[in-house]
Amino acid sequence: MPHNIFRILAVLWVLPAVAFGEGPSLYVRLGGKPGVQRLSESFVRRLRADASLWRTQKMREYKARVPEDQASRALAQRICEVSRDGCSPLKEALPPIPQGVRLDPLDWLQISTHAEHAMIDAKVPTRERLEVIQLLIRAR
């Protein structure tokens, strides 16, 4: 229960700044290129290590086809693209997820847990964590 209260307080703290576009971009607040790379690498490493997310043959083939460093760069690029900052995104896209593959609600719970741990590893400040989670939800 206290964890939910913390999230509600975080929303109340972050939404005004997000809604009015105040202050530096998310990209800058995450530490620019080095900070975004740390976050992306930690998140992708955690996802790839979670066998429950790769249980179908199509997803295992996808994982084999997309190297970890390419996935990390693509995630960093996505964060750059949604930023209002003048960062220069790479022009490298990931291959699309195979047709017919669906992530169920438990998969999304696992993914969000990995995102939370990756943000802790990358020392993402609490205020920015909500924006990163919002980015993840929009990607869904």
Image (spheres, grey):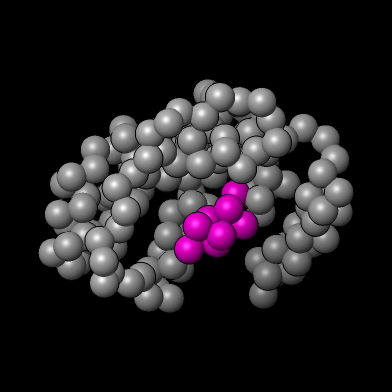
Near-viewer residue (33 or 124): 33
**Residue found 38% across the figure and 34% down from its top:** 92
Residue 29 shows in the view: no
Residue 3 screen position, x and y as percent: 66, 66
Q: Looking at the image, how many numbered discs can be counted on the residues?
A: 0
**Residue found 17% across the figure and 57% down from its top:** 60
Near-viewer residue (33 or 78): 78
**Residue found 57% across the figure and 38% down from its top:** 81
| Displayed quadrant of residue 107 | bottom left
Whether residue 23 is situated above or below residue 86 in the rendered picture: below
Q: Which residues are magenta?
A: 132-140
Whether residue 86 is situated above or below residue 9 in the rendered picture: above
For residue 135: magenta? yes
Q: Quadrant of the N terminus?
A: bottom right
**Residue found 56% across the figure and 60% down from its top:** 138
Whether residue 56 is situated above or below residue 104 in the rendered picture: above
Residue 20 screen position, x and y as percent: 86, 49
For residue 123: magenta? no
Please indicate whether residue 14 sits to the left or right of residue 130 in the image: right
Near-viewer residue (29 or 70): 70
The secondary structure that dominates the magenta segment is helix
| Displayed quadrant of residue 99 | bottom left
Please indicate whether residue 69 sits to the left or right of residue 33 in the image: left
Please indicate whether residue 43 sits to the left or right of residue 62 in the image: right
Residue 91 shows in the view: yes
Residue 39 screen position, x and y as percent: 49, 37
